[in-house]
Amino acid sequence: MSAKISVNLANQGAVINKNIYGHFSEHLGRCIYGGLFVGEDSPIPNKNGMRTDVVEALKHIQVPVLRWPGGCFADEYHWEDGIGPKESRKRMVNTNWGGVVEDNSFGTHEFLELCEQLGCEPYINANVGSGTVREMAEWVEYLNSEGDSTVVKKRWANGRHEPWGVKYWGVGNESWGCGGNMRPEYYADEFRRFNTFCRNYGKNRLYRIACGPNVDDWAWMDGVMKVAGRHCNAITLHYYTVPSGVWEKKGSATEFDTAEYYSTLKHTHKMEKLLKGHLAIMDKYDPKHRVGLIVDEWGTWYEVEPGTNPGFLYQQNTMRDAMVAAINLNIFNSHADRVVMANIAQTVNVLQSVILTDGDQMVKTPTYHVFDLYKAHQDATLLPAEVECAEIEGFRQVTASASEKDGVITMTAANLHADKAEKVLLEIAGCDVKNVTARILTGEIHAKNTFEDQHAVEIAEFTDFTVTEAGIEMNLPGCSVVEVTVRV
Ligand code: AHR
């Protein structure tokens, strides 16, 4: 065997928060409009305006939490523009994304309807940059209060009697940049001020999320944790994979050579270093680990698909993206004790989407299938996986993670080599290895699903393994992701 993954059932880690498998949907390009929401009058099949095909596909991968309305859009979003009769909702120009008209036909009620259809938790990221404390406080009241107030009566008049009990509450997005270009000390004080007036109503307890750093901005993490750490439940981190590592040279989503494939994966592995670095800073101010880390924007960011609006950030998705997803999700799993949520950017038609749409057509991307292969990790107990293997370009050829839930061990691994198969031994101590099944996603590094060929890349049953005294001996093709399930 040239690679070995070792897991021990007796060596149990933290529970993997299902929210690590979360998603992000911004008013950006065709994520909301056309992607998730088409309106009740659309000829595209929908329920209360939400695309039936997309909702069904997302339910299949068990989306646990959905972040909305941005992103940069969040700090220009005024929630009252998106409630009440649609014909009288305010129109605005989406200055962040493509300069298109936003008619606010998808607002608070629609977002929460979408979450109800998906069976997921809403995560609302509220406006600090151009909003007021009163506006934010009243949004929380509108969402969560049962009281007989003018704000709540407005919700009743708009057709919703029961409060929604929204829990996940983000106070500003990228406040170091598009959210207001603030300094960490200033934002930390703003967080404290805004957060103070976001009240808990009834039994609902807000889970208060502070805006954290971009990439390796250690000073931002330090400054915010120092001043606001004890007032928040979690702090965020944003890190996007750019193939060259240089923002100005993003590269194509579909046309790349093997060197660029490896360089993309190499830059993805930076996530590990970022988590370790930021968690160490958080430890200084929060030694008891009360504050969670949320990676609420991650994924690949390429040049937009030629011929599309540059402000819409629409890109295709190949097996390279599947590898990026596998690496990141294994890294998040391995930090299950501290990473409480992660949200891929973004759900539909934007950046590393799990779904692409074109009119009434829908395509599941290779990244979608990775979320399918990994879904058994949600709320399972981490079994720390040790990996011994060769290195490629400074990172390990095999990435893996494992968990156990209800007597089922799930191990997910990827062979990151572009085209060389690898013999991998999966050794599981502490149980009888039998009842083994496996699924695989594999393809040439450029393989993708298109509207013309929607099923080019799909999950298949994986049978190229044998169970021996030593464990499970697998032959993993190059550029593949596998899920192995063992029932103990
Ligand atoms: O996901 C696209 C954008 O990337 C988000 O709006 C912003 O938060 C980040 O810079």
Image (cartoon, grey):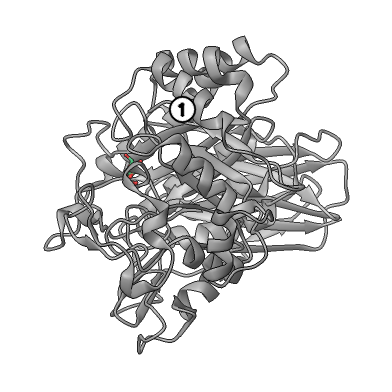
- The reply, left or right, for residue 298 in relation to residue 63 is left
Q: Residue at x 51, y 20 (%)?
A: 278
**Residue at disc 1, secondary structure:** loop
In the figure, residue 450 lies in which quadrant? Answer: bottom left
Residue 87, compared with residue 69, is above or below; it is below
- Image-quarter location of ligand 1: top left
Amino acid of disc 1: Gly
Please say whether residue 3 is visible from this viewpoint: no
Q: Position of residue 99 (x, y in %)?
A: 16, 55
Q: Position of residue 98 (x, y in %)?
A: 18, 55
- The reply, left or right, for residue 267 in relation to residue 413 is left
Closer to the camera, 272 or 294? 294
Q: Residue at x 55, y 31 (%)?
A: 195
- The reply, left or right, for residue 242 in relation to residue 5 is left
Residue 217, compared with residue 146, is above or below; it is above
Residue 273, compared with residue 82, is above or below; it is above
Q: Quadrant of the C terminus?
A: bottom right
Please say whether residue 83 is visible from this viewpoint: yes
Q: Residue at x 51, y 49 (%)?
A: 139
Residue at which label 1 appears: 212
- The reply, left or right, for residue 296 in relation to residue 261 is right
Residues packed near mark 1 inside 10 Å, few (<14), some (14 to 19) or many (20 plus): many
Residue 148, compared with residue 324, is above or below; it is below
